[in-house]
């Protein structure tokens, strides 16, 4: 589903209620309030002090929500120039320049050259029509901290293949999307993609 303009809001934390612009952009589909509320309830204990990546940032709703709720730093990667401008304007409006990096780039290409601190939490919600999950997950895996959290959003009838060592922590569905939160192992590194994890037990916080 594409948005053609309008606003969404930050749900919780220090910027609760702040409205974010939704510029007209093909394929732009911000995560719904219901999905974000559920996701950030799952992540509540992991957010304070976290280094966060919002890879296909769009409106930045996931990155801004993470910062609002206590993340220390967020990198928001977006290739659409209009969306990049909106992200930078939001960072200025929130006085969040010190804790936010807005990157104008293709997310997968940018990951291949990333050499800074590994990410504790990563949000992966690419444009559905582009089919980028497998490539993005392969590029993301080496850039994650041990025991990192990875959020993956996809069409309701699709389960993107994740590295076999990742454990599915929680998942949910709406009529339009499947949303799932994974935990990487203690010895996180580049991993081979070959299907979903078979152990679905929740990982202790």
Image (spheres, rainbow, N blue to C red):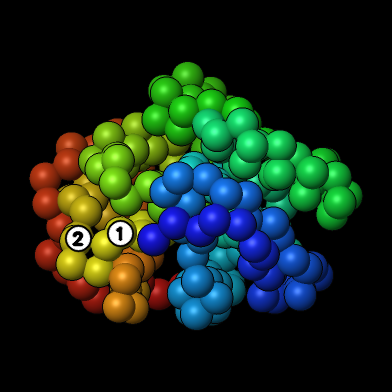
The residue positioned 64% from the left and 37% from the top of the image is: 82
The residue positioned 19% from the left and 61% from the top of the image is: 158
Quadrant for residue 108, please give it: top left
Q: Specify the farthest residue to the top.
A: 113
- Image coordinates of residue 160 in percent, x first then y, are 21, 54
- Image coordinates of residue 103 in percent, x first then y, are 62, 31
Placement of 22 over or under 103, stated as above or below: below
Instruction: Name the quarter where the N terminus is drawn.
Output: bottom left
The residue positioned 50% from the left and 80% from the top of the image is: 34
| Mark number displayed over residue 154 | 1
Residue holding disc 2: 159
Placement of 139 over or under 58, stated as above or below: above
Report the number of numbered marks. 2
Horizontal relation, residue 113 to residue 180: left or right: right
Placement of 150 over or under 89, stated as above or below: below
Q: Quick one: SS at disc 1?
A: strand
Within-10-Å neighbours for mark 2: few <14, some 14–19, many 20+: some
Quadrant for residue 41, please give it: bottom right
Within-10-Å neighbours for mark 1: few <14, some 14–19, many 20+: many
Q: Is residue 148 visible?
A: no
The residue positioned 31% from the left and 71% from the top of the image is: 176
Q: Quick one: SS at disc 2?
A: loop
Q: Is residue 7 visible?
A: yes
Horizontal relation, residue 16 to residue 203: left or right: right
Marks 2/1 in contact by CB < 8 Å: the verdict is yes
Mark 2 vs mark 1, CA separation in Å: 7 Å
* Towards the viewer: 65 or 199: 65
* Towards the viewer: 130 or 24: 24
Label 2 vs 1, first from the N-terminus:
1
Placement of 111 over or under 48, stated as above or below: above
| Mark number displayed over residue 108 | none
């Amino acid at each position: 589903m594409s948005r053609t303009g309008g606003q969404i809001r930050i749900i919780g934390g220090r910027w609760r209620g702040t409205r974010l612009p939704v510029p007209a952009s093909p394929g732009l589909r911000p995560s719904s309030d219901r999905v974000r509320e559920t996701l950030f309830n799952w992540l509540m204990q992991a957010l304070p002090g976290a280094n966060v990546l919002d890879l296909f940032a769009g409106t930045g709703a996931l990155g801004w929500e993470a910062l609002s709720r206590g993340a220390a730093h967020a990198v928001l990667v977006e290739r659409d120039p209009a969306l990049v401008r909106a992200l930078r304007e939001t960072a200025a409006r929130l006085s969040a320049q010190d804790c936010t990096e807005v990157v104008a780039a293709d997310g997968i290409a940018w990951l291949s050259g990333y050499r800074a601190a590994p990410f504790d939490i990563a949000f992966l919600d690419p444009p559905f029509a582009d089919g980028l999950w497998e490539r993005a997950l392969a590029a993301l895996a080496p850039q994650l901290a041990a025991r990192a959290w990875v959020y993956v959003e996809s069409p309701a009838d699709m389960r993107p293949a994740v590295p076999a060592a990742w454990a599915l922590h929680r998942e949910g569905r709406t009529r339009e999307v499947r949303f799932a939160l994974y935990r990487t192992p203690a010895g996180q590194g580049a991993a081979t993609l070959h299907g979903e994890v078979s152990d679905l037990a929740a990982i202790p916080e």
